[in-house]
Amino acid sequence: TKPVILDDGSAVTYPVRDGVTSSSFKETKMMELAQPGVRVRDLSVYARENLVRVYPKGTRIASSNYNPVFAWNAGCQIVALNYQTKTMPVWLNDGKFRDNGASGYVLKPEQMYQDDPLWDASSETLKPLKLNITLFSGHYLPKPEGQKDNTEVIDPYVITQLHSLSNVQTDKTQVVPNNGFNPVWNHDMTFEVHAKELDLLSFVVMDKDRSSKDDFIGHQVIPISLMRTGLRVIPLLGSNGDPIPHAYLFASIKLSN
């Protein structure tokens, strides 16, 4: 099915064709159709009874990826990625589908099936929850991937992001010099959660390097729907998604109205 955007650029129609129950859109078309508001409304309604597949644009010859969150938030069921490139888009995919026993299938939230109001992924129509996090410390953080044990001690910091409906909220700790064993940050941060069933929280630990690009240490992605509050240990994963032995972050997490 080829969608038709109205002349004023607002609503989108999806012509019905006999025997056609699926559509494939490249990422650029998806981003055009998945803008929060009436376009998400029309795409999510279409995706109730039709299968929607999204795939990377052909110019990504280096196997880079697009942000899959916009497609999920619009109800697209199959969001294809260049899975050989282990960066944030693939980590988000791994985190999202850790739900439902990591079976590879996650039900759409009930809001996408309501008729009044129709889902439009607009933060303006939703009452946000407040997510308060105090990131106390890290423990047993390894050297950057590929570096030997006799290299210099790391200078770790943590980038925390909430991947929400139409934006990414970001916070960053200070750098703790020369301490990968038990760096202490005691860093407070606050995020607005607009869709608990869809939003994803990511932690990325980096090593500050004064003379070159900062090095990746470890990461974790947690669906807000699975997140438990209170004092929590956050185990870290390598870039390929494998657990890093003994490495974790220690934090306090609170979610409130």
Image (cartoon, helix red, strand yellow):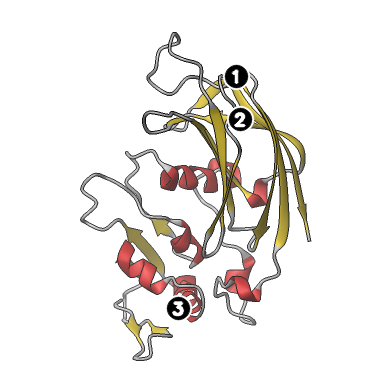
* Mark 1 vs mark 2: in front: 1
Q: Position of residue 78 (x, y in %)?
A: 40, 57
Q: Which residue is mark 3?
A: 39
Measuring 45% from the left and 31% from the top, which residue is drawn there? 216
Q: Quadrant of the N terminus?
A: bottom left
Mark 2 surroundings within 10 Å by alpha-carbon count, few (fewer than 14), some (14 through 19), many (20 or more):
some
Sequence-first disc among 3 and 1: 3
Judging depth in this view, the residue of 170 and 164 nearest the camera is 170
Q: Position of residue 79 (x, y in %)?
A: 39, 56
The label shown at residue 9 is none
Judging depth in this view, the residue of 83 and 166 nearest the camera is 166
Q: Is residue 114 left or right of residue 206?
A: right
Residue type highlighted by circle 1: Tyr
- The answer to whether 47 is drawn above or below residue 157 in the figure is below
Measuring 32% from the left and 74% from the top, which residue is drawn there? 20
- The answer to whether 119 is drawn above or below residue 162 in the figure is below
Mark 3 surroundings within 10 Å by alpha-carbon count, few (fewer than 14), some (14 through 19), many (20 or more):
many
Q: Which residue is mark 1?
A: 140
* Mark 3 vs mark 1: in front: 1
Q: Which residue is mark 2?
A: 235
Task: Find numbered disc 2 in the image and state the secondary structure of the residue it sits on.
Answer: strand
Sequence-first disc among 3 and 2: 3
Q: Position of residue 244 (x, y in %)?
A: 53, 23
User: Can residue 26 be seen here?
Assistant: no
Measuring 40% from the left and 41% from the top, which residue is drawn there? 87
Q: Is residue 92 left or right of residue 162?
A: left
Residue type highlighted by circle 2: Pro
Residue type highlighted by circle 3: Arg
Q: Residue furthest bottom?
A: 7
Q: CA distance from mark 3 to mark 1?
A: 46 Å
Mark 1 surroundings within 10 Å by alpha-carbon count, few (fewer than 14), some (14 through 19), many (20 or more):
some
